[in-house]
């Protein structure tokens, strides 16, 4: 009775997590396509001679009399968002479009201010002069800070790329909305495919209390909440340990705004799984499986090994097991090192990314490419979309973001405990079977 009760609780938690995954997908659709003026990167300034730079527009604090700055944006139209503005009584903030003479001014203080919409000229640039005009008394105050501009996804471009092993190859620029729509549709399809895999997620939920936990894990969507959250909690603990030892694992570069980051990291979940799991595990396994195919249909063996090694028959999997282990380890180490070698992360990220890579390699081998993509999506999209909603829309998404993080970490701790208990039970069972077979 106790065992069935625990299975029921785990199944209920799993169902809640999948509902949360679906909610995060729906939230992404809304942020991409339903929120006006929703794309807010850090300001990419084209006014500097050395090329575009990522920066904030910020006056000295306090500002000098008649302080001025120049900002050039490469978008069809945009509004500036001023995070904080504190002017001395009588001073005026004046923003002038150099190309058209169009202007916007503000006398007073405020935060979260949005200017009027400025439009690009025939060259595709918006050229702005930003000035705090002194009223003649020479007195000043704190000044201003702005770090974002607001436009919408329909006018922005995105540059996709493909990853050949560890070599990124840029592709032509596409509309950002098209890339966002493709990614949302892709991961919706992957969730549906995982739902239907190996008996169906709905059957696992309805009969979860009757079946052993490990048997329910055969469905990738049932397994996803437990595997992903265990990896999350484990890597967080590992990061805290490394930071205690003086090894950082944080970002070393500035990021663009929340929605652009969400788009880029979601796309990375696709191309990195193709680059590191498909090419570094699936392709070598497919070639090796073809050599060992024997009487089996060669095309079927090749495709199964390429996309879902776990679908191979038991004897073939057993013969390929040493190669699977080597490829999983090698691809995961490469995955971890690339995060650091490209200069975006501190050294400790190589360790945590290698651990996450091992988990995704296991999911690729056991469930298939679609499952490893979903685990990657969990980290790059599901955990980020709530924070993006908070940055773009404000409360109550701050509370929802906090709830999601705490819920996922707590479930991860439970998942680690469950996996440890299940692993111990399997080890004891195998030891007993070996003792019995040897007649000891």
Image: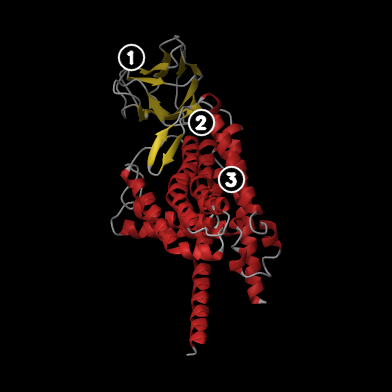
Label 2 with label 3: CB-CB less than 8 Å: no
Q: Secondary structure at mark 3?
A: helix
Q: CA distance from mark 1 to mark 3?
A: 53 Å
171 on left or right of 51: right
Q: Residues within 10 Å of mark 1 (few under 14, many from 20)?
A: few
Mark carried by residue 406: none
Q: Vertical placement of 437 versus 248: above or below?
A: below
Count of number-bearing discs? 3
Q: CA distance from mark 1 to mark 2?
A: 38 Å
Q: Nearer the viewer, mark 1 or mark 2?
A: 2
Decide which of 66, 414 is in the foreground and name it: 414
Q: Is residue 14 visible?
A: yes
Q: Which residue is mark 2?
A: 39
Q: Which residue is mark 1?
A: 136
Q: Which residue is mark 3?
A: 24
Label 1 with label 3: CB-CB less than 8 Å: no
- Residue 342 percent location from the top left of the image: 33, 42
Label 1 with label 2: CB-CB less than 8 Å: no
331 on left or right of 368: left
Q: Nearer the viewer, mark 1 or mark 3?
A: 3
Decide which of 70, 94 is in the foreground and name it: 70
Residue for point 51% across, 73% down: 421
In the picture, which quadrant includes the N terminus?
A: bottom right
């Amino acid at each position: 009775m106790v065992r069935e009760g625990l299975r029921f609780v785990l199944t209920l938690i799993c169902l809640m997590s999948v509902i949360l995954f679906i909610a995060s997908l729906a939230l992404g659709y809304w942020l991409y396509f339903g929120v006006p003026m929703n794309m807010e990167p850090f300001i990419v300034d084209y006014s500097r001679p050395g090329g575009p730079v990522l920066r904030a527009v910020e006056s000295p604090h306090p500002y000098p009399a008649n302080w001025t700055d120049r900002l050039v944006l490469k978008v069809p139209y945009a509004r500036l968002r001023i995070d904080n503005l504190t002017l001395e009584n009588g001073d005026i903030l004046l923003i002038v479009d150099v190309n058209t003479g169009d202007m916007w001014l503000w006398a007073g203080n405020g935060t979260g201010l949005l200017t009027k919409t400025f439009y690009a000229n025939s060259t595709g640039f918006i050229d702005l002069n930003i000035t705090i005009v002194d009223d003649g008394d020479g007195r000043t105050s704190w000044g201003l800070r702005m770090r974002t501009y607001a436009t919408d996804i329909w006018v922005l471009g995105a540059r996709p790329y493909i990853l050949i092993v560890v070599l990124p190859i840029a592709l032509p620029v596409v509309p950002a909305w098209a890339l966002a729509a493709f990614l949302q549709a892709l991961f919706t399809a992957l969730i549906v495919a995982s739902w239907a895999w190996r008996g169906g997620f709905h059957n696992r939920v309805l009969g979860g209390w009757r079946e052993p936990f490990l048997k329910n894990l055969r469905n990738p969507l049932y397994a996803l909440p437990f595997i992903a959250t265990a990896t999350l909690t484990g890597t967080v603990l590992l990061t805290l340990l490394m930071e205690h030892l003086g090894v950082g694992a944080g970002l070393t570069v500035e990021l663009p705004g929340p929605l652009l980051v969400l788009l880029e990291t979601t796309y990375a979940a696709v191309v990195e799984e193709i680059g590191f799991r498909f090419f570094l595990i699936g392709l070598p396994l497919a070639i090796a499986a073809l050599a060992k195919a024997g009487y089996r249909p060669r095309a079927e063996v090749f495709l199964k090994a390429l996309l879902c090694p776990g679908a191979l028959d038991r004897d073939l999997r057993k013969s390929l097991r040493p190669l699977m282990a080597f490829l999983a380890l090698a691809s995961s180490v490469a995955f971890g090192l690339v995060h650091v070698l490209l200069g975006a992360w501190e050294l400790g990220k190589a360790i945590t990314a290698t651990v996450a890579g091992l988990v995704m390699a296991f999911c690729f081998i056991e469930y298939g490419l679609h499952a490893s993509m979903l685990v990657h999506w969990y980290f790059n999209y599901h955990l980020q979309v709530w924070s993006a909603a908070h940055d773009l829309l404000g409360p109550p998404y701050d509370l929802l973001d906090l709830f999601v993080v705490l819920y996922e970490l707590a479930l991860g701790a439970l998942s680690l405990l469950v996996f440890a208990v299940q692993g111990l039970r399997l080890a004891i069972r195998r030891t007993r079977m070996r003792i019995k077979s040897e007649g000891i």
